[in-house]
Amino acid sequence: MFDWLVSWWDGVEFWVVGLWFPFQFVLVMAVLLPVCWGVALGIDRSVDRVSAALGAARRQREDRA
C-alpha cells in the first residue's frame, strides 16, 4: 500500500547520505530546526490552554465553596 512512499523515502535517504557532510548538516538543520520549533510551540500552547482551563475550573470551585 505504501510502497511508493517507502521507495521515495529510500531515494531521499540515499540522496542525503551521498551529500558532502557540511551539506548534510545544513540540510538537516534547515528542516529539523523549524520542525522542532513548531513542535515546541504547539506543546507550549497546549500546556497554556490546559493550565488556563484547570485554573478556571479551580477558581469556579473555590467561588462555590
Image (spheres, rainbow, N blue to C red):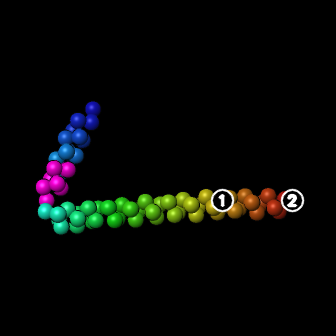
Q: Residue at x 64, y 63 (%)?
A: 52
Residue denoted by label 2: 65
Image: magenta residue range: 13-19
In percent of width and height, residue 11 lies at 16, 47
| Residue, far right | 65
52 falls in the magenta region: no
Q: Residue at x 68, y 58 (%)?
A: 54
Residue 9 to residue 48: above or below = above
Badge count: 2
| Secondary element at image label 1 | helix
Q: Is residue 32 left or right of residue 27?
A: right
Neighbour tally class for label 1: few under 14, some 14-19, many 20 plus, Cα within 10 Å: few
In percent of width and height, residue 47 lies at 56, 60
**Distance from the alpha carbon under mark 2 to that under mark 1:** 19 Å
Q: Quadrant of residue 38?
A: bottom left
Q: Quadrant of residue 25?
A: bottom left
Of the residues shown, which amino acid type is indicated by label 2? Ala
Q: Residue at x 21, y 38 (%)?
A: 4
Q: Is residue 16 left or right of residue 53?
A: left
Residue 25 to residue 14: above or below = below
Residue denoted by label 1: 53
Q: Quadrant of residue 3?
A: top left
* Front residue of this view, candidates 64 and 32: 32
In percent of width and height, residue 1 lies at 27, 32
| Secondary element at image label 2 | loop
17 falls in the magenta region: yes
| Residue, far front | 21
Neighbour tally class for label 2: few under 14, some 14-19, many 20 plus, Cα within 10 Å: few
In percent of width and height, residue 50 lies at 61, 58
Query: Residue 11 bears which disc, if any?
Result: none
Residue 57 to residue 2: above or below = below
